[in-house]
Image: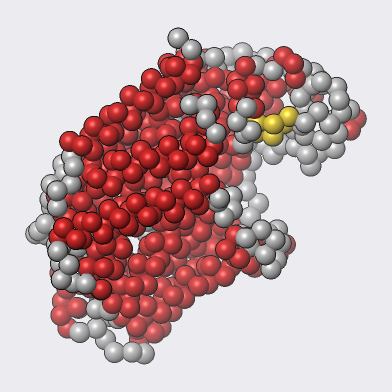
Amino acid sequence: MSQFAINLLFVGASFALYIGIAIWARAGSTKDFYVAGGGVHPITNGMATAADWMSAASFISMAGLLASGGYANSTFLMGWTGGYVILAMLLAPYLRKFGKFTVPDFIGDRFYSNTARLVAIVCLITASVTYVIGQMTGAGVAFSRFLEVSNTWGIWLAALIVFLYAVFGGMKGITYTQVAQYIVLIIAYTIPAVFIAFQLTGNPIPMFGMFSTHTESGIPLLEKLDSVVSALGFRDYTADVDNKLNMVLFTLSLMVGTAGLPHVIIRFFTVPKVADARWSAGWALVFIALLYLTAPAVGSMARLNLMTTVYPEMAGQVENYDEAAQNPILYEERPEWVRTWEETGLISFNDLNNDGRIQFYNDGTDYTDRGWEGNELTVNNDILVLANPEIANLPGWVIGLIAAGGIAAALSTAAGLLLAISSAISHDLIKTMINPKISEKGEMLAARISMGGAILLATYLGLNPPGFAAQTVALAFGIAGASLFPALMMGIFSKRMNNSGAIAGMLAGLICTLLYIFTYLGWFFIPDTNTLANTPENWILGISPLSFGAVGAMINFAVAFAVSRVTAAPPQEIQDLVESVRYPKGAGMAIDH
């Protein structure tokens, strides 16, 4: 059986499973559509939350980021995981006690203001639409490689599958589909990692293999990797970070952005009780840890595999790395996986010195004495996890499995984001603010139409992204962290916080973050419209645009507290409500009002 047939079998079977679940769990009411009826078991919800939270960025991109940047990019791992812990400990149980369907519901009622609700809707839609672009793009990458279609057709196929199970199934269909997707993606992620760890170190447990001895050279794997990359002019894989302030702020930005992401928060409204929200948060952390403890090992081993593919003599070296670097692989002898990925455009080769060999090194290093005239190989970081089984010559069924896993990771988060957008439009905007008398049938129709529209918009933006994935994801996390997270925290833990303070804080955090990001990355990400070059010397206090979400959140907190102190206190019934939410016991089902 050909590899294409195997890929088609795995991906097709997973799609049939998702659509079958959606038909079985078809939403029959708004309660089913928004919160899956409110009766999901904590373990089931924990697994679905893990799939919802671990997007294509986690499955495809994070190991690639760790592979390319080493310790410096561990901020992604720490920020995303830390943010989930904040969400689970400080937000989820209290929001569940409040008992409404959505984040704008909480903000609108807690701050007794439709203006606050509207600002929250705008922030939610902007952050979610921006974030879903990366998911559609990731699905397009996976489709284009494994189903051998163009990137454009890959994104349209992803949109069709999401439409079929999300629009009709709602949260009920999405929940059980995400359970299946988690099982697919975690198996797809860990099996290749086990194979590769055993090949390189003899230890089948990836997180332990990373700290084990590299079999071929007899030295620790990370020491081996440091020696290989430094011989090619790259920064040591385990090297420390110079700009600690930026590293801390970037980690905080990812943390508060993660904790403010509405598509994850809404999952905690699907369980019957507050205690179940806590248990499902704990289970989700267990399921997330299975992948996140494996990712650093996958990243380090993928980087070593890639380097020793281009420079085969380096694999067994202990000392003479410079000598081994003189004899890179001939382009005509490149392995089959390189040829396959070249067809997608995600690997490209340009023979600058016309010697027929692949020079892959840091362009900032002068290696003219070796006859090298510039780096000749361009490798997209997002392919490393998907290509790992091929790099390690694993069986065809493993490649088919990881194809299904990569697509599952992208689609699971895309569905959650689209549901958050849909509920914000149909429930928070139409039912709550525009037409409170709308029937349940009318609200369901509005929800499905708005989700269909959101899918079309996300597909268009995935085909024509406003910038690089890192830029758009940074904007999504920045918006969520700088606008929604502080409002949620202050709404739960400050009885004195009023509507004027919350609105002023959200607007201040949102506007400051957008202005800073657009100044360096281009206005609305339009190329060549940036005011300043995106270089460290132009950053204020050395703060990267990708790290500014944490500063935006601080501005939000400061403005909100200042404004609330000079304006009237909230009504007594709101203060009593906050007091009751702080003690998350006895919450009923989520309220549709």
Question: Is residue 583 or residue 58 the one in the foreground?
Answer: 58
Whether residue 150 sits left or right of residue 323 in the image: it is left
Is residue 99 visible in the rendered structure shown here?
no
Residue 209 coordinates in the image, percent (x, y)? 49, 23
Question: Is residue 557 or residue 524 the one in the foreground?
Answer: 524
Whether residue 198 sits left or right of residue 333 in the image: it is left
| Quadrant of the rendering where the N terminus is positioned | top left
Question: Is residue 201 or residue 445 the one in the foreground?
Answer: 445
In the displayed structure, 48 sits above or below 576; it is: above
Where residue 305 sits, quadrant-wise, is top right
How many marks are shown on the rendered structure?
0
Seen at 48% across and 19% down, the residue is 4
| Quadrant of the rendering where the C terminus is positioned | bottom left
In the displayed structure, 346 sits above or below 485; it is: above
In the displayed structure, 350 sits above or below 527; it is: above
Residue 484 coordinates in the image, percent (x, y)? 37, 65
Is residue 294 visible in the rendered structure shown here?
yes
State the residue lying farthest toward the top: 1
Where residue 410 sits, quadrant-wise, is top left
Whether residue 279 sits left or right of residue 337 in the image: it is left
Question: Is residue 44 or residue 565 the one in the foreground?
Answer: 44
Seen at 28% across and 47% down, the residue is 167
Where residue 376 sits, quadrant-wise, is top right
Residue 134 coordinates in the image, percent (x, y)? 49, 47
Residue 293 coordinates in the image, percent (x, y)? 42, 34
Seen at 17% across and 50% down, the residue is 32
Seen at 47% across and 70% down, the residue is 510
